[in-house]
Image (cartoon, rainbow, N blue to C red):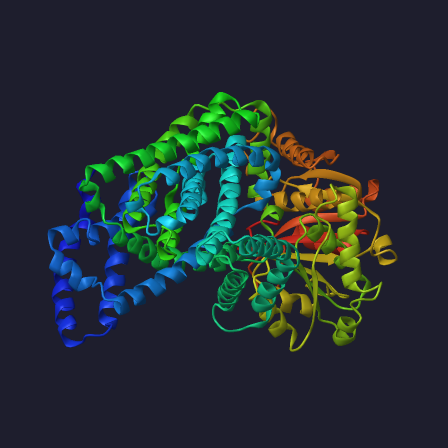
Amino acid sequence: MPWRLLRPVGLVPAALVLTTIAAGAEGGKAAGPSEFLLVAQIVLLIAVGRGLGEIMQRVGQPSVIGELLAGIILGPSLFGWIWPEAQHAIFPKAPEQKAMLDGIAQFGILLLLLLTGMETDLKLVRKVGRAAIAISIAGILVPFACGFALGEFLPDALLPNPQQRLVASLFMGTALSISSVKIVAVVVREMNFMRRNVGQIIVATAVIDDTIGWIIIAVIFSLASHGTLDIASVAKAVLGTLAFLAVSFTIGRRLVFQLIRWANDNLVSAAAVITVILLLMSVMALITHLIGVHTVLGAFVAGILVGESPILTRQIDERLRGLISSFFMPVFFGLAGLSADLSVLRDPNLLMLTGLLVVIASVGKFGGAFVGGTLGGLNNRESLALASGMNARGSTEVIIATIGLSIGVLSQNLFTMIVTMAIVTTMAMPPMLRAALARLPMNKDEKERLEREEFEKRGFLANLERPLLAVDESVNATFAAHIAGLIAGMRGLPITVLHIGKSAKEQEKGRDQEESHEAVVKKAAEVVSAHGDGGAGNVDVVTRARQAELGETIADEARKGFDLLVVGVDKVVTAKDRFDRRIDDIAAKFEGPLAIVVAKGKHLKQPAPEALNILVPVSGSGISKRGAEVAVALAQGGSGSLRVIYVATTRDKGAQRGASRGLGQEAGILKDASDLAARYDVDITTTLRVNRAPEAAILREIDTTDADLVVMGVDRIQADHLSFGGVADAVLRQSKVSVLLVSSGEARQAPAEKA
């Protein structure tokens, strides 16, 4: 290991000496709890924990190991053994002082479970659900039986209350059977196996293990609270848990989404959404406590629901994760390490029992997962990878052990043994899983699926989260609502309809009428569902009316995280070769991608058509590919036809040089468009027009085909007014059919020649 990796650790002795001197001085002043000591404890746990976590990550281990080791180093295992007076001065055993740090750690448990829930991908579980459930059941039963048997044979001296051996045995069984979703997911992601078949099964199985484990822990908490096997209390806990889960994943899912959306759209204070998320977590934790189970279940379920919210922006997600990872994780795991006194392992009997615990935990989980994988249809290599991954306990095990210690199920020595087991199994897992995954070949079907998913991930629409539709009372607005509904319906995206016309208030009040823009959006989304797999057509539509000057209204909406603005207003262009002033005002205040809709031809009489015959020009540029992607998506959403025409512009010549070797540049670009359509099962017709000006070629194609909508990907041009270049302007003004311009988010400099 390079010596520079140890620099953070080299600062620990100096920090400890300074803190010890200050702690001694502070301790002499006051007999009660000290705020100074609390801050000093937090500083040490964060500094040492994050430093060691950084080192662990650089050597291929999860950072949680470093945070646990920080607590062990600062606790009685090392610091207290070398310099007990100093360790007691910084971390005194006074109940009042310990309670201050324990309070932070207990809230940290809830936040860690919130984060775990947010990382739980239920879609992944549903995708491989049948195999994962079968594997998970076998992977839980075997180690649970091993842990329960071990609990039954533990010496009375290791149990805080030998009369409650049944509860302790159940707790041991659960502790040995659960896996750490976080550790498993991190390693699988690092290996680029998250989308591989076996990677999905490993993560999905860990999710199911975690979920079942927290439910069992909640029931055990109820048992421990009553001291004996009270059937009535257990029934209350089980039925209450089932009712809580049923309500949470039906009514609760909708309620959480609406609350997050309301906070994002209406509250102007800083970090309003994070405040709402923390309140949701706390309320759900309190509900589970009132049911009679542990608060961690409420926090875990809250995290799942929050993670499923379609408008949880990446920025909010990163802020919340940053707070938890940088503050609460090192404090909580550091405190767990402080509570583990590894010096007790100098006792040969305890050391032998700890080794036995590690062996039983590893063999039980490894064997159970391997058998489950075999029964679930995996081959031996895949089952080996699965078993290697499921053996990591990590943070989940430490949280469970901490809960067991706090409710009196585990003794201090047994807690130390379980934490040791968690450290050993977690450190062994990454190299074992990496070795097992590296040997797995990829079959043809899996390779094609991965290529398709990678392609979709880079796409514009695949990363779309929240479209905004700005409309007035015109026919063009109705056509724009139809287009927006097709786009939103493909993935069930929530959409906001912003009325900006003269009768905006009246339009908002009439949102439930059959001819309203909201109704058009929903109907178009239903069309997508009817033509697709029937799973995504349900969209949530919110209506807002113009409250202020147009530019200010758009600016207020833009800050809410919309990533596409669809514009449908009566007048789009003026006689002076410019866009209408309202379009200019809208574009000036919205920095993201725009979709400007212009209804012409038959769409003026039928603005919500049953089918669209789409023409999309491509040139090889990135923005023209975006236009092609939107066109393909619209064609997939409804019936009709799709025609792709290659047009060469000055700016785009040579842009794709070297692409699709063996074919000409033009044919290669059309082949890329055909491949794009094939991925979405859309039939297309392709045409080459290389000897005409781009606008002339597009207009000629309109005149000679049955196209009724032209979709163009266009760049914003830097100017004192909104401009998309000469080609887009010519098509927009001269086309006899409807036009949809899909722009980039940032303006670029105008080219030297017409493009």
**Location of residue 396 in the rendering, given as x and y in whole percent from the top left corner:** 41, 47
Left/right of residue 599 with respect to residue 271 in the rendered view: right
Q: Residue at x 78, y 42 (%)?
A: 531
Quadrant hosting residue 545 = bottom right
**Location of residue 322 in the rendering, given as x and y in whole percent from the top left corner:** 40, 57
Q: Is residue 279 above or below residue 683?
A: below
Q: Which residue of the protein is positioned furthest toward the front in this rendering?
A: 163
Q: Is residue 261 above or below residue 49?
A: below
Q: Is residue 618 above or below residue 293?
A: above
Left/right of residue 743 with respect to residue 484 in the rendered view: left
**Location of residue 105 in the rendering, given as x and y in whole percent from the top left corner:** 35, 60
Q: Along the line of sight, which residue is nearer the eye, 640 or 380?
A: 380
Q: Which residue of the protein is positioned furthest toward the right in this rendering?
A: 605
Q: Along the line of sight, which residue is nearer the eye, 464 or 110?
A: 110
Left/right of residue 53 with respect to residue 25 in the rendered view: right
Q: Is residue 190 visible?
A: no
